[in-house]
C-alpha cells in the first residue's frame, strides 16, 4: 500500500483522509491548525509538524487547500522534499493556470496530477465524490477511486479547468434560484409554492442545492472560485453572481458558512 501524505484537513479534507484510512493506506496528515488532525490521529494517521515533514517518505502527496495562494505556500515547503518516483495530486480548486505554474516547478522524477472533486461534504464522507483527473493519473487512479468515481479529463490542468466550469454552473444556479425566490417574494407568492414549481423545472438541482442542509461549500470559497472563472473569460452574468457572494461574505457570520446561507442575503437585497 502506498504511503500517502494528505495536506489540508478542512471540511473536505477531513472526510477524504478518512477514506484513505479506511482503505488501510499508511497516512501522514498535516494541517495549518494542528488540532484538526487529532481525530485522524486517533483513527490511525500520523500527524506531521510541517508540510515538508509530511511528504518526505510519501509515495503519493495529496493537497486539498483553500486556494492558489495556500497551494503556492505549501509548494514552497514540499517541492524540495518530494522524492523521485512520487506523485503529487493537487485536489484543490485553483484553476488550470496555477496547475501549469506548479508543473513548471515540480522536480524531475515527480509526477503532478490535478484532480479536483465534484460534490460536498456529504459525498466526501460517503466516498461518492466525482474526481476530475487531469494528466498522467493512471498510477494513482486506484487511490483517487477511494474518493469516488474517477473521470479522466485529458492533459494536465484539464481537471482544474473542468472544475471551474462545474462550479460556475452550480454557483450561478444557486444565485439564480435566490433571485427567482426574491421575485416570488415581491409577487406575494407562498415560498413553498414557488420552490415546488422551480424544483420541478430545469433548475431542480440548483433549487435542491440552494436549500440544502448538512453540506458545506463556504461562501468565501465561492467568491474565490467565481473570481477565478471571471478572470479567464468575459462572464457578465457571473460578475453579478460574484457581487452577490461578496455581499454575503460581508457578513462575517456567513462568510465561512455554506452557500445556501447566501440565498437569504440575495433575497433580502433591496431592489434597484
Image (cartoon, rainbow, N blue to C red):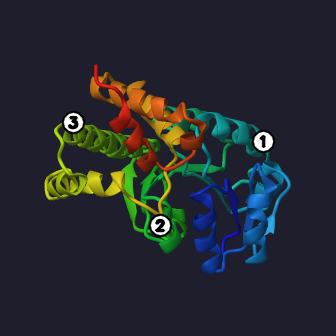
- Residue at the spot of label 1: 77
Q: Mark 3, residues whose alpha carbon is within 10 Å: few (<14), some, or many (≥20)?
A: few
- Residue at the spot of label 3: 186
Secondary structure type for disc 3: helix
**Are circles 2 and 3 on residues that touch, CB within 8 Å?**
no
Say if 83 sits above or below 235 in the image: below
- Residue at the spot of label 2: 122
Secondary structure type for disc 1: helix
Residue drawn at 56 percent across, 58 percent down: 12
In the displayed structure, does residue 180 sit left or right of residue 18?
Answer: left
Closer-to-camera residue (183/160) = 183
Closer-to-camera residue (181/20) = 181
Residue 2 in picture, x, y percent from top left: 66, 71
Residue 231 in picture, x, y percent from top left: 42, 24
Position of the N terminus by quadrant: bottom right
Q: CA distance from mark 1 to mark 2?
A: 31 Å
Q: Mark 1, residues whose alpha carbon is within 10 Å: few (<14), some, or many (≥20)?
A: some
Q: Give the number of the mark in front: 2 or 3.
A: 3
- Locate residue 106: give its quadrant: top right
In the displayed structure, does residue 190 sit left or right of residue 31?
Answer: left
Q: CA distance from mark 2 to mark 3?
A: 34 Å
The disc, 1 or 3, on the residue closer to the chain's N-terminal end is 1
Q: Give the number of the mark in front: 1 or 3.
A: 3
Q: Mark 2, residues whose alpha carbon is within 10 Å: few (<14), some, or many (≥20)?
A: some
Residue drawn at 60 percent across, 43 percent down: 66
Position of the C terminus by quadrant: top left
Say if 133 sits above or below 139 in the image: above
In the displayed structure, does residue 258 sit left or right of residue 169?
Answer: right
- Locate residue 236: give its quadrant: top left
Q: CA distance from mark 1 to mark 3?
A: 53 Å
Secondary structure type for disc 2: helix
Amino acid at each position: 500500500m502506498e504511503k500517502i501524505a494528505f495536506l489540508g484537513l478542512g471540511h473536505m479534507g477531513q472526510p477524504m483522509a478518512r477514506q484513505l484510512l479506511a482503505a488501510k493506506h499508511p497516512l501522514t496528515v498535516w494541517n495549518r491548525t494542528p488540532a484538526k488532525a487529532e481525530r485522524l490521529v486517533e483513527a490511525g494517521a500520523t500527524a506531521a509538524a510541517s508540510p515538508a515533514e509530511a511528504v518526505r517518505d510519501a509515495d503519493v502527496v495529496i493537497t486539498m487547500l483553500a486556494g492558489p495562494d495556500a497551494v503556492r505556500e505549501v509548494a514552497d515547503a514540499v517541492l524540495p522534499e518530494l522524492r523521485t518516483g512520487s506523485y503529487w495530486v493537487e485536489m484543490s480548486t485553483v484553476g488550470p493556470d496555477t496547475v501549469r505554474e506548479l508543473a513548471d516547478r515540480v522536480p524531475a522524477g515527480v509526477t503532478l496530477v490535478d484532480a479536483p472533486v465534484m460534490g460536498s461534504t456529504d459525498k466526501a464522507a460517503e466516498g461518492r465524490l466525482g474526481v476530475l483527473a487531469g494528466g498522467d493519473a493512471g498510477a494513482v487512479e486506484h487511490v483517487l477511486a477511494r474518493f469516488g468515481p474517477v473521470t479522466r479529463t485529458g492533459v494536465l490542468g484539464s481537471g482544474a479547468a473542468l472544475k471551474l466550469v462545474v462550479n460556475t454552473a452550480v454557483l450561478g444556479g444557486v444565485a439564480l434560484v435566490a433571485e427567482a425566490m426574491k421575485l416570488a417574494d415581491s409577487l406575494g407568492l407562498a415560498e413553498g409554492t414557488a420552490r415546488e414549481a422551480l424544483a420541478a423545472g430545469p433548475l431542480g438541482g440548483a433549487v435542491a442545492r440552494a436549500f440544502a442542509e448538512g453540506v458545506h461549500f463556504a461562501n468565501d470559497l465561492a467568491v474565490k472560485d467565481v473570481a477565478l472563472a471571471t478572470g479567464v473569460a468575459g462572464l457578465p452574468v457571473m460578475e453579478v453572481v460574484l457581487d452577490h457572494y461578496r455581499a454575503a461574505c460581508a457578513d462575517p457570520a456567513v462568510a465561512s458558512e455554506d452557500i445556501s446561507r447566501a440565498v437569504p442575503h440575495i433575497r433580502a437585497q433591496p431592489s434597484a
